[in-house]
Amino acid sequence: MRATEPATKPVEGGPVETRTRYDADTLAALTADATAIMERYPDPRSGLLPMLHLVQSVDGYVSRDGILFCAEMLGITAAEVSAVATFYTQYKRHPNGTYTVGVCTNTLCAVMGGDAIFDELSDHLGVGHDETTDDGAITLERIECNAACDYAPVVMVNWEFFDNQTPETATALADKLRLGEDVAPTRGAASVCSFKQMSRILAGFPDGRADEGVGAGEPTLAGLKIARERGWTAPDAEAPATGESQAEVPPVTGAPGSSAQRQPTTPADTEVGKDKKPGEDAK
């Protein structure tokens, strides 16, 4: 069987052939969605990443059955699917909570209090990184930068932004999630969906809420606002000579931005003084 041919095929009058343990209705729905994913790409194997999100939207993690399903659909081995599923942290190999609460502890968020928020949440929930509360509500994670440094420290709930958090606001947020109360992100969608729903969106099946709520907030737009008030514009790029590509123009020593523009200012900058120790005069 070629790698580009689906391995799961309908059996006349019966369910789809498969080694998975999905029931017939679940398997039929998965097969239809997986087929739609595969049709997006010239090579169906390119659909593996969204397909893993798809099975995660059904099982709540990338299960044994999910791995087998992807392998059968794409005509590849389960080992090849597992190699991808274990490489990316958004694919969970054990049941995930209804909500992934991610605390950014990258440089700026950490300096602004991200580490303290994570520690407080960990103590409050009784779980560590990539662990889930006993009620199955929250999986806590340390996460890398989410490109929201102007709102640091940031907490994400199923990849929705909760900006300018503190240990107190973060624990209050977690309590509301565990109680099943609605919470509203600072920016983006008007509410938070479940982990399974979020996984389906990442599989390429939008929920129609992409334009809800605030996109870019005031801190993000502050620089643009000042530039418009003062009439600042970006300089025009110099077009290359006709018939000559930018890469073919040799660099000019001493051109703007070149280190050759810097004039010698200390004895160590000169040939005569380069071997002198600090404090010694060049002779």
Image: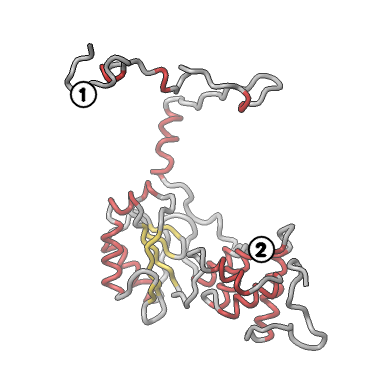
Quadrant showing the N terminus: bottom right
Q: Position of residue 21 (x, y in %)?
A: 62, 86
Badge number at residue 142: none
Q: Is residue 16 left or right of residue 140?
A: right
Image location of residue 140, percent across then percent down: 37, 69
Q: Earlier in the sequence, mark 2 or mark 1?
A: 2
Is 253 placed above or below 136 here?
above
Residue sitting at the far bottom: 13
Residue at mark 1: 277
- Establish if 153 lies above or below 78: above
The residue shown at (61%, 28%) is 247
SS for callout 1: loop
Residue 72 relative to residue 115: left or right: right
Instruction: Tell me: residue 111, above or below residue 137.
Output: above
Q: Which is more toward the observer, 115 or 250?
A: 250
Q: Is residue 3 left or right of residue 198?
A: right
The residue beneath circle 2 is 47
Closer to viewer: mark 2 or mark 1: 1
The furthest residue to the top: 283
Task: Specify few, some or many for label 1: CA neighbours under 10 Å numbering under 14, 14-19, or 20 or more.
Answer: few
Amino acid carrying label 2: it is Gly
The residue sitting at 46% across, 19% down in the picture is 256
- Residue 283 drawn at (x, y percent): 22, 11
Q: Residues within 10 Å of mark 2 (few under 14, many from 20)?
A: many
- Tell me which corner region of the image, top left, top right, bottom left or bottom right, holds residue 83: bottom right
